[in-house]
Amino acid sequence: MKEFADLAARLREHRLEFPREPIEGDHPRSPRGATIIQPAPARESQFYSAASLKGKPVPPREWLVHGLVPNRTVTLFSGDGGTGKSLLALQLAVAVAAQTPWLGRAVTPGRVIFLSAEDDDDELHRRIDDILRAESRSYDDLEGLTLRSLAGEDALLAVDTQLQLMASALFEELDARAAEESPALIVIDTLADVYPANENDRAKVRQFVGILRGLAIRRKCAVMLLGHPSLTGLNSGTGTSGSTAWNNSVRSRLYLSRITDNGFEPDPDARILATKKANYGRTGDEISLKWREGVFVAEAQGTGLDALAAGAKAERVFLKLLDAMTAQGRYVSASPGPTYAPTQFASLPEAEGCTKRALKGAMEALFSRGEIVIATHGSGAKARSHIARKGAENAQN
């Protein structure tokens, strides 16, 4: 009891008391040092009946670049390091601010905020100078383009509290600038510098994209987030990165890639800009690009009779080479690998200049029309599949 009395005396000396049961009439008090939980902010969204939409005009779909970059949401623009995605995104920023087309496509004009965590101010200056020269524009046309280089600085737009991601002070600064400027586009380069958590953490990925989407909705603009694909995404050609939540959380995803054939790059200046995801438009669209004098330009695409003629030629060559190799007992497959038909055919002198890409398109078209099918040769454990003409499915070695 003496020890208890001594402890009580020391507590009174420091004006502390043992916890006690609350007495009626007491006001609730927070324990010394306890964390006070603030109530959650009121949500802006409300439940409503779909019938209330009757008579209201249907809002049009808003685009920054029609079919490629939707407004009021996040577009993930990925590409391997050195492919030129930062340059292409800066070209888009200049086009929006200067009210000029981007890769031959019309853009919604407006102000732009370009946040770069990779390039310093000198590099941004050099690139903008190249773009203006190529577009025959001047710096006076870029009053609406706001730049900020975070190269060498802490560029995190969120803080990982372990429980969830919270917007960082830098994000609040970006949001305040966007509220002041009302931009049509915000570009953030690059994901690895601004995201604080594990890229494979689905919950954190969705939270981060949600933070950026909230910015896009609040400021009524398009947000473009630049990123690098994972090794799997690079090898597969999908351009995905880390968790599938990146692809699932954004409403639009673009991928910039080099053109290679079995590891060989026939033209180091050629690129393909592909739409890998488009919740509001068509996926699978591709734009052929060529790097010229410091910028990317869109290559003229075959249309009408020219496109039909090129496709017909590739199909004719595919069938010709398929017949020749089948007659020699050299079977080809429709799956990527050592016997992949487009790869095998493109390497032959008889390919008439058709590329692997063109022959792949021809193969898909021939399959869709049923002119070629999957057949088998061999038996038992040695059975293998191959491509055959329709009607020759039972051909054997």
Image (spheres, rainbow, N blue to C red):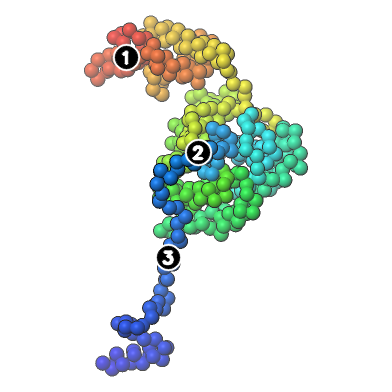
Return the disc, 1 or 3, that comes first in the chain's sequence: 3
User: Mark 2 or 1 closer to N-term?
Assistant: 2
Residue 308 higher or lower than 195, as above or below: above
- Relative horizontal placement of residue 171, taking residue 123 as reference (left or right): left
Quadrant housing residue 107: top right
Residue drawn 23% across and 17% down?
380
In whole angstroms, how far apart are the C-alphas of marks 3 and 2?
Answer: 36 Å
Q: Which residue, as the protein is rendered here, is positioned at the far front?
A: 55
Q: Is residue 153 visible?
A: no
Q: Quadrant of the C terminus?
A: top left
Q: CA distance from mark 2 to mark 1?
A: 51 Å
- Which disc number belongs to residue 375? 1
Residue bearing the label numbered 3: 39
Occupied quadrant, residue 299: top right
- Please provide percent x and percent y for residue 36: 42, 71
For the N terminus, give its image quadrant.
bottom left
- Seen from the viewer's position, the closer of residues 39 and 267 is 39
- Return the mark for residue 58: 2
